[in-house]
Amino acid sequence: AVAVTLILGLSLGLTRRQKTIKSTFFSRCEKFKEHDCQKLWDLFEKAHVNKDPCNVPVEAYDPLIAAAPFIPDCKKMMFWSGTKDVVHDLTAKRKDCYFTLEDTLLGSILDGLMWCGKNGKDDTFTTGCPGWSDCENNPVRSFWKCASAAYADAACGDVTAMLSGSTTTPFDPESIFASIEVTRLKAPRVSSLNVVMVLQMNAKSDCTNASLKNLQNQLDPNITYSCKDVAEHRVEQCGSQPQIMCGSCW
Ligand code: N1C
């Protein structure tokens, strides 16, 4: 009886967990109209189900990315590293000015989620998965690398990147922004990269930070680079005062 209860409890728990990520996936997907959410879910699962969760290459998510309609407003594209909350607070309120990967179909579906498959199992799991840095080829990291590459390829015009003044290395070579996105921005499609250094109280770095030299060295030399130190409250102000024109926020 104990064994039966255990097995029943385990499998119930499993179905519930699985239902959670699947229902989150579908409810977020259905908010965007005209998409085949079932097809996207199937491609999503195919990338990692029944695989070693530390051995899911970036390319495993290519079919999913290819199937998702991906038409960001290329002139408004915003990148970020270490500034997720302040950026998303802003972009939620100022869709007229900025657009992030989380505003695309797949980015919004998978934002904040954790998942993996396991060898010999047909399910998507949300617990017992490798963390971001536990192994390089984990499903979550591979997905964001794949999506970020496609996102950066789509950029055009004047691009903004919000980096954090609260770390000593705002342009962190390990980050997705540094390792994937920056080198994919190409002139003349992209004309400028405008870094906003978001400064909180007691900031540790600003536009003079040495790591930003590496950014400029990695950037296509035909893309104009600029950097501006901006207090965090000014960024928040831009969100709360929609009458401020996009170009005059800082
Ligand atoms: O490693 P990062 O930042 O430099 O990645 C941010 C960069 C952005 O410009 C996005 O386009 O890469 C893209 N991106 C996401 O859109 C995204 N949404 C959620 C990268 N990572 C993303 N996440 C989660 O944030 C991801 O699961 C990981 O845990 C963080 C990476 O954030 P970071 O180090 O601040």
Image (tube, helix red, strand yellow):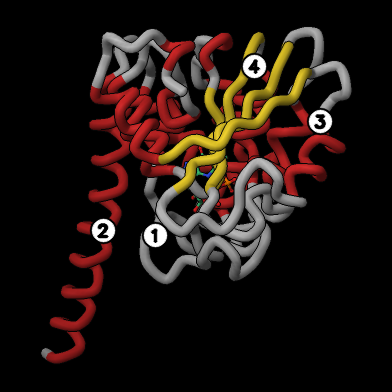
Earlier sequence position, callout 4 versus callout 3 = 4
Q: What is the C-alpha distance between the residues marked 3 and 2?
A: 43 Å
User: Label 2 is placed on what type of residue?
Assistant: Arg
Residue contact at pointers 4 and 2, CB within 8 angstroms: no
Q: Is residue 199 above or below residue 54?
A: above
Q: Residues within 10 Å of mark 2 (few under 14, many from 20)?
A: some
Q: Earlier in the sequence, mark 4 or mark 1?
A: 1
Instruction: Please give the residue where the numbered disc 1 appears in the rendered image.
Output: 125
Say which quarter of the image contains residue 7. bottom left
Answer above or below: position of 215 versus 119: above
Residue at which label 4 appears: 154
Which residue has dot 3 on it? 219
* Sequence-first tag of 4 and 2: 2
Amino acid type, callout 4? Ala
What secondary structure is marked by label 3?
A: loop
Residue 122 in view: no
Spatial CA span between label 2 and label 1? 7 Å
Q: Residue at x 68, y 23 (%)?
A: 193
Mark sitting earlier along the chain (2/1): 2
Q: The disc labelled 1 sits on which kind of residue? A: Phe
Q: Are marks 3 and 2 in contact (CB under 8 Å)?
A: no
Q: Nearer the viewer, mark 4 or mark 3?
A: 3
